[in-house]
Image (cartoon, rainbow, N blue to C red):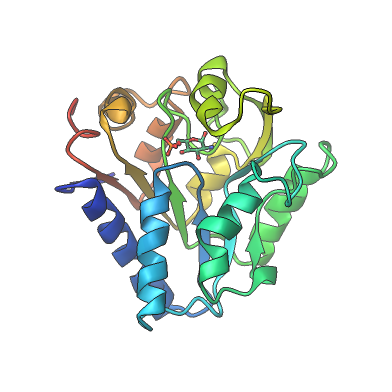
Amino acid sequence: MQVIIAESAQEVATLGADQVAELVQSRVDAVLGLATGSTPIALYRELIRRHRRGDLSFSGVRSFNLDEYLGLGPEHPQSYRYFMNRELFDHIDIQPENTRVPDGLGDAGTVGDEYEALIEAAGGIDLQVLGIGRNGHIGFNEPSSSLGSGTRIKTLSPDTVRDNSRFFGPDEFQPRLAITMGIGTILRARRAMLLATGAAKADAVRAMVEGPLSASCPASALQLHPRALVILDPEAASAL
Ligand code: GLP
């Protein structure tokens, strides 16, 4: 696991964008694994800036998002599909049909296997972008998730529901279930790049980088990945 401590959250985004740009410029039909949450927003803004400057085209790129809330359709403002359109896809030249987010309205019995088959048919993921939850989750792989898991339905932990409640209005339905790529799916990506910013992530980052490989910190599974890059700001790195 390679760890880079950047000077600021903005530099985390810039270094992350450099990785994405290098891949997309060397392989026009690259397959990106993408993430939601507040952390990658600065990365997406940087990619949009580079696209608008004419430096970066996504016209042949294909993408697979990590996860989606079960029960929310693509038009739902809290769905991760809606988030991705708003924060990235609507502002770059990626073909909408080349972007995939797990189907929140899909059949719970088959949606995971179908998503795995789509990833395989695309030739696998070249670079998986990740954030990290305060409890060490990646995607929605909560502590105790199997390290070999594939895409499937997961129940969100009370901590995660609480952390993400800031995005929901007081009377708004907040899903407790999600479809997420598994840890095994993430480990199959040819490269993984995890971004973390802010002091609230410091303990999870320490468990991921310095702790034992354990399902109680799902992100520690990245210790097994031959090409995992972790980019931190000084606050997220403060417990290392
Ligand atoms: C969510 C997402 C994760 C993300 C995590 C951290 O639960 N499923 O992919 O990494 O939250 O989010 P944030 O970046 O907002 O701290």
On the rendered structure, is 96 left or right of 198? right
Q: Is residue 2 above or below residue 108?
A: below
On the rendered structure, is 33 left or right of 19? right
- Of 205 and 9, nearer the camera is 9
Say which residue appears at 33% left-offset and 30% top-offset.
208
Q: How many marks?
A: 0
**Residue positioned most to the left:** 7
State which quadrant residue 96 falls in.
bottom right
**Residue positioned most to the top:** 158
Say which residue appears at 57% left-offset and 19% top-offset.
157
Tell me where residue 46 appears, x and y as whole percent.
Answer: 35, 63
Q: Is residue 111 visible?
A: yes
Q: Is residue 97 above or below residue 156?
A: below
| Rendered-image quadrant of the C terminus | top left
On the rendered structure, is 86 left or right of 107? left
| Rendered-image quadrant of the N terminus | top left
Q: Is residue 20 visible?
A: no
Q: Is residue 137 above or below residue 179?
A: above
Tell me where residue 77 appears, x and y as whole percent.
Answer: 66, 45
State which quadrant residue 22 falls in.
bottom left
State which quadrant residue 135 falls in.
top left
Tell me where residue 234 appears, x and y as whole percent.
Answer: 17, 38
On the rendered structure, is 236 left or right of 79? left
Tell me where residue 29 appears, x and y as whole percent.
Answer: 54, 77
Say which residue appears at 40% left-offset and 25% top-offset.
134
- Of 41 and 183, nearer the camera is 41
